[in-house]
Image: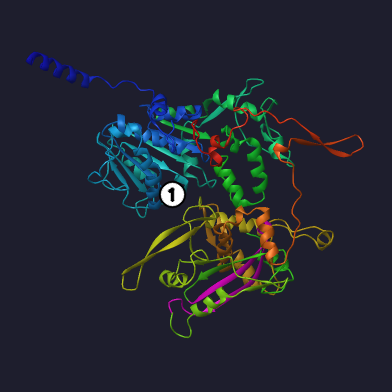
Amino acid sequence: MTGFRTARSVRRWLDSLRPPPKIDICAWIEKHARLYNGGRIRLYEYQKEIARAMVDPKVTMVTWRKAARVGFTQLVSAMLAYWAAHDQGNNVMVVQPTVEDGEDYSKDVVEPMLGWPVMALCSDQGAKKSGDTIKRKAWTTGGSLKIAGANSPRAFRRIDLDKVVFDEVDGYPHSAGKEGDQISLGIQRLTQSVSPLAVLASTPLIAGHSRIESRYLEGTQESWHVPCPHCGEFQRLEWNPEGNGPGVKWDAADPIGSAYYLCVSGCVIEERHKASMVAKGRYVAANPDALKKGHRSFDVSQLYLTLDGASWGKLASRYEEVKDRPGELQVFTNTVLGETFRVKGLAPEWQLLYDRRDDYRPGIVPSPACLVTMGIDVQKDRIEAYTWAWGRGRECWLIDYQIFQGSPFDKTTADSPWPPLREYVNRTWEHENGTHLKPLRVAIDTGFATTEVAAFVRGFSPSFMLPVKGASSAAAPVMSNPRAMDLTDTKGRKRRALKVWVVGDHVLKQELFGLLALPKPTDEALKAGGTYPAGYIHLGKNVASEEVCRQLVGEEWDQANGRWRDTYAHEALDCWKYARASLDAAGVERWTDAKWREAEAAVGIHREAPARRPKAQDNVTVTSDVNGMTGVTAQAAPRRTAASSPGPADDWLNGGGRRRRGW
């Protein structure tokens, strides 16, 4: 019996000396990783090679310049689980743009991952382990996961790492306080590891100032090439809607129905070929020598996605909507194409704005406007409020602005600016049709005299009065959901937190300058029935003084340094941003035609409902005979197949449910 025990101990000792079995990482992910709904993951072909690169001992850095929603988050979740289960003792860090983003990542991504069956071997779900927090998880197999914000100076101190994942690096602040570049700090922490790996990923933002772009160019620069179904030529899918070369093409009158891809050889490729093309694709490196340094870099756009929400036609339709709006065009370029955007930050001359002003009565909401929002800016010796009226297409009119003199810290004397501001906010505005309306939303800046602003805000409904602050990231949307901001009084005591909305400064400045540059229709064109372009900004002669016009263009983009710089006072610009962002907070961007007609009818503007279009289930086709007479012909309903018509459950891009293929 003793000899048997000795033999068993020797066998176990010998087994421990054997190299670990070679694991097919893609097969492991598809077996053990889970989607948010609990279903198994099925990787797309372009994801598989990236996963293999992350476990290749010859690779020390993987960079992914990517479009949004191409599967990075779930792929990293799978790799975190794999490292916990198989690379025992490894210390891993995930770096998000901010500490708040890191906390959200822990709740939304890491916590669900801990519920995967394979993680039962690595983590104790029943009880909290010593040292576990929302930002740190220790594995029972050894090693740990730490989640940090790139804006935290202390995040990279006193730690040794084996793997570090830098997520959305183009959204990072310029540095971690006085510590310097966050990516360099994180990579330095890999020095003592025997299997170091740095993973960088982001949707790229600004041309010339994109961290992910720079790192991508240092790597192998691998793009997914797919074969033409007609000639077999392998090629990278390009956008190029206006050029003569290969790319997605369409008829502007019907982008969804007419879109196709023009092959490098001139072949016409239809949407139905995309899935098989992508499945047969392969990565082609433009800089293969970078592999000698252990750096592989990849790029993937939404042109490769085989889901209905990312069809070439729907992407073309979206492009048609935003191509003349710089701020939204940047979002499309970054998130759909996965490319950097060159900012056109030259503001129009203030004199042009002053000279083109319109004649309309100040303080009166003109037709066709039917909404009012207000933006408020707080300065050390005054408070400024600008009131804007809005119509369809975000066409807007400056109808009033007021300056309330006095220190915002003065809340009790007769010179306090707060009582007259409160009265101003609560007033109603007369419409030219004779009705009256209150502001839909009011947004006030919290960057100065924050405690005093908080006291003012709490006197109103939180759905009406929105405390706001500017976003630090150029990637921020027009308006982000509110986050709690801790407050202290003059004695340093903590007060009740204030929920503050985050305004996308960068995207709104681009939008404003693009809209201010729209040409004003001539009087002849307007008399002939012409209209102002969507988003046109009206400035009244009795409202917009020279000072207001100067302030509206009081900043410009500094391409050399990748930031906005002041050229004049810009309170008017800031207040327009707040008033404009208020529309998004109120959900106006999602209004249907029926909702707009309801708002217009409330102020005496009456429009006829659009003629009903035949629905797909009506099975009719509008035809015309040789004499030009039109008619309606009954038609058999087309048969829908799983390959050609994914249902809502398959459409993750549009919020679908039980999707089991990819994410």
**Is 23 contained in the magenta span?**
no
Q: Can residue 570 be seen in the rendering of this structure?
A: yes
In the depicted view, which residue is nearer to us: 401 or 158?
A: 401
Rendering colour mode: rainbow
Q: Position of residue 290 (x, y in %)?
A: 45, 30
Tell me which residue sits at (56%, 27%) in the image.
278
Q: Can residue 535 be seen in the rendering of this structure?
A: no
In the depicted view, which residue is nearer to us: 15 or 625?
A: 625
Numbered marks: total: 1
Q: Position of residue 371 (x, y in %)?
A: 64, 64
**Is 409 contained in the magenta span?**
yes
Question: Quadrant of the image for the N terminus?
Answer: top left
56 horizontally vs 560: left or right: left
Residue 32, compared with residue 1, is above or below; it is: below
Q: Which residue is mark 1?
A: 172
Amino acid type, callout 1: Tyr
Residue 85, compared with residue 370, is above or below; it is: above
In the picture as drawn, the residue positioned furthest to the left comes out as 2
In the depicted view, which residue is nearer to us: 202 or 287?
A: 202
State whether the magenta stretch is mostly helix, strand or loop. Answer: strand
**Label 1 residue SS:** loop
In the picture as drawn, the residue positioned furthest to the bottom comes out as 414
Q: Position of residue 286 (x, y in %)?
A: 52, 29
344 horizontally vs 416: left or right: right
28 horizontally vs 310: left or right: left
Where does the magenta region start and end?
381-410
548 horizontally vs 136: left or right: right
Residue 185, compared with residue 272, is above or below; it is: below
In the picture as drawn, the residue positioned furthest to the right comes out as 627
Q: Residues within 10 Å of mark 1 (few under 14, many from 20)?
A: many
Q: Position of residue 213 (x, y in %)?
A: 50, 41
